Image (cartoon, rainbow, N blue to C red):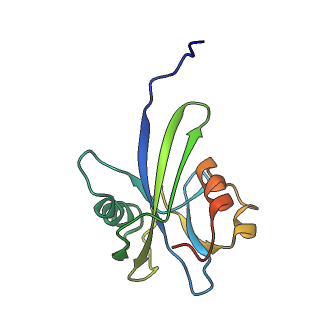
Amino acid sequence: MQQNIPDCFYRISVKALILDDEKRFLLTKEENGKWELPGGGLDFGEKPQKCLVREIKEEMGLDVTFVTDNPSYFLTSQVKNKHWFANVIYFAKVKDLNFTPSYECVEIRFFTKAEALKENLFSNIVDFVALYDPNNH
């Protein structure tokens, strides 16, 4: 039996897992009211670590001081029954949290899993919260 398999295309999004001392993870609130992990789309030919440095600087005005060599999480999600995204999540650190607001980052806050699930989250963050283990970074 032959199945209809759609063309496979995933937009790659590189995200930062930034933790506080209590191992709560940092989320950014966008202008539309939804919460997301810091980071963004990987450009063609770009290294993921460089992408995180660029995206966090562009969206938040923060300086990244550390990014792991290997990702801590990988997940796929579909946005509003349309586009598929592959999220590659790297543990990272920033110099400070004195962010510059933009339409992609109007607020930042650290969350536990339970706290995050009470908020308006993008679907990929709901998936991330299900996977998140404070000991995995």
Res. 23 image quadrant: bottom right
Q: Residue at x 57, y 38 (%)?
A: 78
Quadrant the N terminus occupies:
top right
Q: Residue at x 54, y 77 (%)?
A: 19
Q: Residue at x 50, y 22 (%)?
A: 6
Q: Position of residue 98 (x, y in %)?
A: 44, 79
Q: Position of residue 68 (x, y in %)?
A: 38, 72
Relative to residue 20, is residue 85 depicted above or below? above
Q: Position of residue 90 (x, y in %)?
A: 44, 66
Relative to residue 99, is residue 130 depicted above or below? above
Q: Position of residue 38 (x, y in %)?
A: 47, 63
Q: Is residue 51 left or right of residue 21?
A: left
Relative to residue 106, is residue 19 depicted above or below? below
Q: Is residue 46 left or right of residue 71?
A: left
| Name of the residue lying farthest toward the front | 1
Front-lying residue, 22 or 35: 22
Res. 71 image quadrant: bottom left
